[in-house]
Amino acid sequence: MLLSEQCYKKIDRELAKYPADQRQSAVMAALAHAQDELGWLAPETMKEIADYIGMPAIAVQEVATFYNMYNVKPVGKHKITVCTNLPCALSGGVRAAEYLKQKLGIDFRETTADGQFTLVEGECMGACGDAPVLLVSNKTMCSWMSNEKIDAMLEELKK
C-alpha cells in the first residue's frame, strides 16, 4: 500500500458522493489527495488509485497527465507556477518568471538543488487583472507579484 489509511479515508469520503456505478467521478479528488500525501503521482500510485476506484489504470493516467495541477514527476517542496498567458505576460508575468529564474537559479521545469522549489509555466489562472499571478503548490494564488513581493514570498516559503 503506497497511500496511508488517512488518505484512503479521504478518498472514501469522495467516493461516497457518487453512486456506486459512477465511482470514477471521484478520480480527480483521489489524485489530489494522493499528491498531497506523496508530493507527486508515480505510475504505481496512479495504478493503486485505479485499482481502488475500479478504473483502468490508463484512464487514471489520462486524467493525471491532462491537468497541469497534477505532478507526474517529482517536484520540489514548493511548486511555483507562473502565469505566462498573454494578458499576464504583457502585465509582468514574463518579468516575474525571469526574476524567479534568476533568484532560484533554475529554469522552467527544474527544481533547486536543495529540493525546495520547482518552477513551471502555467496557463490562465482566471485572474488577469491581478497580473502577474503565481500559484504556489496548487493551493495559494499570489497577485500583483513585484520583485519585492516575490522576495518576501520566497523567504516565507523557506521557513
Image (cartoon, helix red, strand yellow):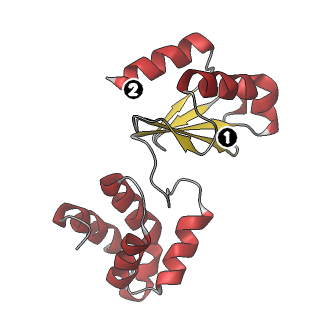
Q: How many marks?
A: 2
Which type of secondary structure does the marked residue at label 1 adopt?
loop
User: Which residue, given by chain and number where applicable, does mark 2 sit on?
Assistant: 157
Could you classify mark 2 by the number of other residues whose Cα lies within 10 Å: few (under 14), some (14-19), or many (20 or more)? few
Query: Are discs 2 and 1 less than 8 Å apart at CB?
Result: no
Q: List the single residue furthest toward the left.
A: 5
The structure residue drawn at horizontal position 22% and vertical position 74%, both measured from the top left corner, is 1
The structure residue drawn at horizontal position 65% and vertical position 44%, both measured from the top left corner, is 122
Picture coordinates of residue 76 (x, y %)? 43, 42
- Name the foreground residue: 43 vs 110: 110
- Report whether 128 appears left or right of 1: right
Kind of residue at disc 2: Leu
Could you classify mark 1 by the number of other residues whose Cα lies within 10 Å: few (under 14), some (14-19), or many (20 or more)? few
Q: Is residue 119 above or below residue 67?
A: above
Q: Mark 2, mark 1: which one is toward the viewer?
A: 2
Kind of residue at disc 1: Gly
For the C terminus, the image quarter is top left
Picture coordinates of residue 46 (x, y %)? 42, 73
Q: Would you say residue 110 is visible in this rendering? A: yes
Picture coordinates of residue 55 (x, y %)? 44, 85
The structure residue drawn at horizontal position 56% and vertical position 21%, both measured from the top left corner, is 103
- Report whether 53 appears left or right of 81: left
Measure how far apart labels 2 and 1 are at the Cα level: 24 Å
- Report whether 83 appears left or right of 138: right
Residue 19 falls in image quadrant: bottom left
User: Which residue, given by chain and number where applicable, does mark 1 sit on?
Assistant: 126
